[in-house]
Amino acid sequence: MALKNSFANVANNLLSRNFGGTLVGTADPYLSGYHFIWFARLPPFLYQYAGFDNNADIGKILTGSCLSVTPPGGTLNKVEFTGLGGIKWAVPGNIDYGNSVSMKFLEFNGIPILKIMHGWIKMIRDYRTGTSNLIDTETLSGYTKATYAGLVYYWTTAPDAKTVEYYAAYDGVFPTKDPQDLFTSDVETVGRVDTEIEFSLDYVWHEDWVKEKCQEYAEEIFKVKTDVIERYGTAISSIG
């Protein structure tokens, strides 16, 4: 397959590896820091335990407050053999992928992130009884993965915040920590609270359909850019 896109000209400058300029050898580097998440599925009753009106509001808060994401990596383990004189050789054995993803969120007045994570944990295992609060309803079974886990998409973009670069879908996610221990206080220290949560997961997907879904969500989020410009422009122009 022929090289294309922003890295096509890497082959034109194998010597200095200076890919600046606008002509021969130009290749745009990948820049981190432009990322988004979108919870496509949350536990149906989560909003009740977290004290919100609906799950849509919870999803938007998590998307808007996400500061960083640490995806799981994979390791191809090998099986080693020893030949004559101690010479070693190896073949692939098995693939081992991490089963958790870490996300960091900025906390706000009203502690919405704590309420969401505390409510999610309490729904799964109530700290007062040690049992689950999930019960059977007319449409949902009580304690099942479908009623306490979720599905989240994660993607990074070019600096335009629209062109999807890296993408992944994490299914079967649920938090493994009630972050109340982060809310310590000291009169000599005034600072912000970043809530880092490790989510357990069952499946990691990196297929083409994941990129398509992430691009759809990216387009939806990108609309906010125009709304912000118009909203604040109108508001400022009306002053005085």
Image (cartoon, rainbow, N blue to C red):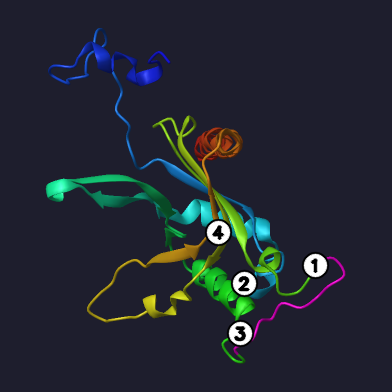
Name the residue tied to disc 3: 126
Distance Cα–Cα, label 4 vs label 1: 21 Å
Say which amino acid is labelled 4: Asp
What x and y, as percent, mark residue 13?
20, 14
* Residue ID for mark 2: 50
Report which residue position mark 1 lands on: 140
Amino acid residing under circle 2: Ala
Q: Are marks 4 and 1 in contact (CB under 8 Å)?
A: no
Q: Is residue 28 left or right of residue 160?
A: left
Q: In the rendering, at what x and y percent does residue 104 appear?
A: 41, 59
Work out whether residue 115 or residue 97 is closer to the camera in this orientation and state it: 97
Separation of marks 2 and 1 at Cα, in angstroms: 19 Å
Quadrant hosting residue 142: bottom right
Q: Residue 77 appears at what percent x and percent y?
A: 35, 52
Within-10-Å neighbours for mark 4: few <14, some 14–19, many 20+: some
Q: Give, as a single range, the part of the protein colored magenta.
A: 130-140
Residue 218 sits above or below residue 59 on the image: above
Q: Residue at x 43, y 54 (%)?
A: 97
The quarter of the picture where the N terminus appears is top left
Residue linked to disc 4 = 202
